[in-house]
Amino acid sequence: MKVSHLTQDYVQKLYAEYGQLDVLDDIIANRAADSPPTAILGYPRHEGRVNEYEYFTGAQLDRYIDNAVKELIALGISPVSAPVKLPYPMDDS
């Protein structure tokens, strides 16, 4: 599966079309509609080996997130009323 690559021109096109995507859920929900589905995340299949990845499309990640949220709500954890925004760029120091 081919992993999507975002160019600066493509990002500007997305801003013009959808506005700025402020939270990760906005980006994943937007990419869930990719046709054909395109991998947006790759994760190593085996611990300690980085030569084999499992790839996930936006639609897969959107379903995983939705199911995780349903489980958290079932456990009594209430959703927040507004998205939580982190400052960008994050400081890794």
Image (cartoon, helix red, strand yellow):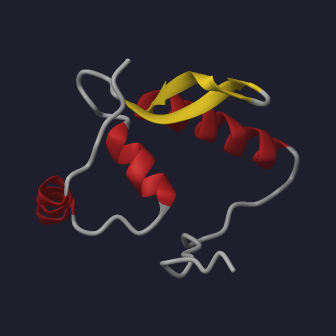
Q: Quadrant of the C terminus?
A: bottom right
Residue sitting at x 60%, y 39%: 66
Q: Position of residue 15 (x, y in %)?
A: 19, 64
Q: Quadrant of the N terminus?
A: top left
Residue sitting at x 79%, y 28%: 47
Q: Is residue 77 above or below residue 93?
A: above
Q: Is residue 18 above or below residue 49?
A: below
Q: Position of residue 46 (x, y in %)?
A: 74, 22
Comparing 3 with 32, the one in front is 3
Q: Is residue 61 left or right of residue 29?
A: right
Residue, far right: 75
- What is the tally of numbered marks visible in this picture? 0
Q: Position of residue 27 (x, y in %)?
A: 39, 52
Q: Is residue 63 left or right of residue 31?
A: right
Q: Position of residue 75 (x, y in %)?
A: 88, 46
Q: Is residue 38 left or right of residue 82?
A: left
* Residue 91 lies in quadrant: bottom right
Q: Is residue 46 left or right of residue 13?
A: right
Residue sitting at x 49%, y 78%: 89
